Structure formats: structure tokens, C-alpha cells
Image: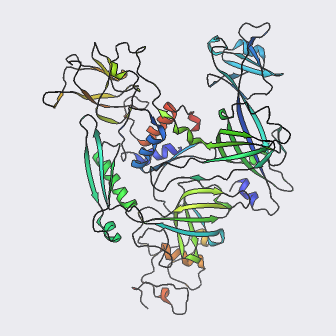
Amino acid sequence: MTVLTDRLGRPSADTVVIAELTAGERLLLWSLTAGKTYTYEADSSLLPVDVKQNGVSLTSQSSVDAVEANAGSWYAASGKVYVRTVGDVSTDSVTLQAIVPFYMATKARVLNDVYYEPRIVSLPSLSLRIERKFGDPGQLGSGSISFANGDGYFDTLSGLQWDAGVVVLKIGIDLPDAPAIYSEYDTIGTFLSKTWTKGDDKFTLQFEEWKSRTKKKIPTTFYDRDEYPGLRDSDVGKPKQIAYGKIYDVPPVCVDLANKIFQVAGHPIIEFIETRVKNEATGGWVRQIDVTYDPPNAQFTLPSWDQVAEVAADFIGKALEDGITVMDNPSDVIKDILLTYLGEAPSSIG
Amino acid sequence: MGYFDDAKTALAGRSRLSVYIKEETEAAEVISGINEVSGTYLFSDYDGLYRYRAYSAPTGASVLSFTQDEVFLFQEMTDAKDIVSMVRVEYRYRPSKDYSQVLVYENPSAQHLQGEPAPLLKELRVPLYEGSDAEVLAQMIALFEGDRQRTFKARVSRRGWSLLPADFISLSYARRGVSATFEVLEVKRNYESFTVDLLLGAPRGEIPGGGGSGGGPAGQDGHWTGDAENFPASLGGGSADSWSPGWTDEQRAYVRANLGYWCESEYALDADPNSYKPSCWSFG
């Protein structure tokens, strides 16, 4: 039993829900900080907890001098954000975004020296659910939370990128003789902000569960002539394939028509099993012997190919970290999709 | 060990995938296909962490247990649509030649119990390349979808606060003659009353015709039991070897659901009005 569930059993328990929100603020109009060579500054009326360059967090520092000494870092004070970019590239050539926090509650509280404003006026009704039939698309949990806006608090904040932020809801139980401390609060949901509405009396955030990120399409890299100058016309713009396990009889992409080079995946593979070329006269498929294989580049060369006939390949796809064991266990595959292709952080894997 | 590691261990050598993504596809669609062939779930928990879990029948003693005092509502729902008695699985698909290996598995009793004159066919093409994995999948589908799907709504006490989907619980609700293990499908916490609303599934592959209100345990696999049984600690412990009129309602519900008393004369005591529906094989 947790502290929270123990407290629930007490007759005079008093419930408090807190919301920890973040939103993005794009930082523009940069200028070189006086007396510095690499450090630039921009105005921000909000105190960020993170600054990102092209979506990647920079390192937080405790002074402007420390920022000047470290590429890829930031510091904020007195309405200014100071940044030295990664690679010392121009601040105008990258997207710089501050992540700013907001702390709200159903009842005013000070937790860990942070004031939680009593602005929550309605809470979401949420559940966690899986489907009875395996594989049925799981319901994406969604909901909304509203905050009091009678004083116009959110009027100047609706321009923030709330969709860049996260909503974390926690619940605590105060007892008459022992108000809950921060560590005794229990997380009841972590969500992604999606849309928001602002009215005279309240500001409402609609959100979705974390898994909604899996609605993104993969692969997101494509064959083009910048990378493959000899790419066959019909293969221009095709996605770079992703392959797990033993793959049979797939048509490869011809990445170099003149030199008769084909590619079956956008990542290294373990090995090729066989390649075949279709005999258009008979309709049969002929196994190829005169083939050069290049598994690290997922490519093979067919010197005898007539540049017209259909080609098919059998191969073994991605390997585990050891480089030799096939990645075909569903657990490994789903983790790889999340981390490699959806860009999720390793810390998001429970 | 995390949830992904646990699932990896459970799935080793059972669902070896052959997944080739050559067109832009929603990752969720790919993941759903994998879940379908491997009997797994992916969901995000309260902290926003991804949880990946493989279905496996509970081992009993380790699950959270609720007695009637902690169950405030219980409702049973049965869905007898889409019963499957024959499974045709295409695996190791070869796109250039457009053909697959094919495996057919039949569970005729599912058809006959439905009173259907012809097999109830389910066809699917799966991202597997080993015949043995496809066979396991076909049998799993025939077993899990060969009977009506029974789900239950229950409202339980705050002790259910920490439950997550894909957990298992043991629940005794003597008013409906229920004492069984269930799979948690949905968890909804009530922040005012601090109760927890659960959507529960009967363990998959329960014996057709078993269970149901009044006729025995709801949602419990049929099984033989030993001859030296004890109550779990949550029901006070102690021997459950012989039927006793002195047992509580929860204890009676538990033994009806979990233990065999077909040869116990005490189970049919005329003096015990709670010796409900004794087995026709009992004597005394």
C-alpha cells in the first residue's frame, strides 16, 4: 500500500489534485550578448525549465559565463534567455524553443518551494484500457482540464505552443495533522496537449495519452538522387524500408541503375539468403549466382541483370546490438520502432 | 527486468516476426499487427511510460484479491458474436510471387456448440515466417475466439488504485456465486469516492458452457484440484478440504469456483441451505 492509499482510508482526508504543465515558447529576435563572443540573448517573460535547439535539449548552466564557455548550453535570468548553440551556428538558422512550466492545483499549495495556483476548475474523466481482442486498435485516451481565467491570466499565454508540452496530473491526500508532501503525491496521468480554448472564465486544454505518438507514419526517410545519383526513375521518393526477421521475395529498390546495385532496407541487415530475376518469357524466377552482397549497406549488385527484368531478394533483416542475432522477437521490434523510428526516449520504456 | 524484458522472455521462440515496412504506414498499425500475432498489449501507464505485456494465464497466488466487502458493483456481459471454429493462417508471404504458406486449424466443437452447419472461418495473413509459430497462433485464436467473450464490470475499493490493464485480480462476490480470477482490461479511478471501476475479462480459453450465474464460477477455467486445499490468507486461511456449513459466503464462493467437491457428502447437506447445487456425482 502506498502512502496515498493508506491516507485514503482516513475519514477526514482532504483531496488535492495538482497539474504540472509545460508549453513551448519560440525564441526569436536574438542579439549577441554584450562582451561575449558566442552567447546570444532573447527576451522571455517566462522562466524556462529547458531550451531546445531543433527539438534537442541544450545543457542548462548557472551563469552567462558558463554558457559562453560551453557550446550547446543555455541560462535564463531577469527576463532573458542566453544561448550558445550547438556547433556555434547562427541562432537564425535553427529553431530555438524555451519550455516553460506552469503549476496549478485544485487548492492553493506550496510544494517543494513551488506555488501551485488554485486554478483547476474541472478535471478529466480518464481510464486506462486495452482491448479484449489482441491487435484491435487500442482506444487513445483523451480528456480535458480547465483552469480559471476570470482574471485573464491565460490571455497572454494562448500564443504559446501548448502542443509542445506535457500535462502531468497528481493527486495527494491532506490529513488534518499531516498535509501531503510532494513525494506523497501519486501521478494519475501523463498526457500530451493537443488543442486549447480560451474563454472569459476558463482556459481548457484538450489532451491525448502518450501512446498517441504511435499514430505517426514510418518510415520517414526516402530514396532521392542527392544520396543516390543513379537511382532508377520509378524508385525516386520511395521510403527506405524497415526489415525485421526473415524476409522473403521482396522487390528491392534499384539505387544505381547503371551499376545494377539494389537496396532492400534503410539500415544494415544480417545477411542475404538469395536473389532471383524473373524470366519474362517463361514467367519463372531464376536464382542468381553472380551476385555481390553488401549487408552493412543492405545492398547487392547483379552484374548480369538486363536493367529491365523484375528482381526479388530473400534476406535476414535487422540485428540486435550484438550485430549477429536476428531482431525478430516482438518485444525487441516494438521497442526498436518506438526508439529508432518514433524518436521516443529510452527513459519512456517502462 | 522491465515489462519489455519480461515480454521478450515470454515470447522467445513463439512469435518470430517477419515484418517488412516498405510504404509509409502508421506505426500504430504495425504495432497492432504485431500484438495480434503475439498476444500482447502496448499501452502507456499513468506516468506516460510505455508498457508492453504478453498475455499469460495467472499463477493464482500472486494476484491482488478482493472479497465481497470490497466489491460495490458487479455486472456480467456476454458477447457471442464472431465465434471462430476454423482458422486459416497465411504466413511467410512472398510478395513478388504473391503466395504464402498456408495453415488451417479447426476446432469443430466451437462450431457445434453454436449450432452452426458450417465452420466459422477466420482468415488472416500474419507477419510470421516459422510454421510452428503460425500453428501456435492458429491454435491460440481458435481457443480464445472459439467461445463467447465474457466481460465484467466491477467497482472495487481503493485497494485497486494501483492496478493496470493486463494485470490479473482474484475476486469473490458471493451474492452472484463468483469467485474467480479475471484479466483487467480497463481501469478507471474515481477521484471523489476513491473507488476503482474495472472492466474485467474472463481468462481466455475458458471451457465452453462452464460458468455463468448460478451454474458455477464466472470466468474460471475448469481444472482438477488437489486433495489438501487451503483458503488463501485473504479469506482467513485454514483447511478447505471438507465442505463446512460454517464457512462464510466468500469462502463458499471461493471453493465452488476453485476447488472440487464432487465427491464430498458434506457438500449436499440437507441441513445446510448454502450447499448450493451439489454435483450430481456426490453421495451421502
The quadrant where residue B112 appears? bottom left
Label total for image: 0
Q: Position of residue A233 (x, y in %)?
A: 34, 18
Q: Residue at x 71, y 12 (%)?
A: A69
**Residue farthest toward the front in the current orientation of the protein:** A200
Q: Quadrant of the N terminus of chain A?
A: bottom right
Q: Is residue A28 above or below residue A177?
A: above
Q: Nearer the viewer, residue B58 or B191?
A: B191
Residue A350 at least partly seen:
no
Q: Residue at x 40, y 15 (%)?
A: A225
- What is the image's colouring? rainbow
Q: Is residue B64 above or below residue B19?
A: below
Please state if A179 lies on the left or on the right of B214 as rendered: right
Residue A112 at least partly seen:
yes
Q: Nearer the viewer, residue B262 or B114?
A: B114
Please state if B164 lies on the left or on the right of A333 as rendered: right
Q: Position of residue A28 (x, y in %)?
A: 72, 18
Q: Position of residue B155 (x, y in %)?
A: 63, 65
Q: Quadrant of the C terminus of chain A?
A: top right
**Residue farthest toward the left in the current orientation of the protein:** A282
The quadrant where residue B272 appears? bottom right
Q: Nearer the viewer, residue A112 or B88?
A: B88
Q: Position of residue B153 (x, y in %)?
A: 57, 65
Q: Is residue B203 above or below residue B174?
A: above
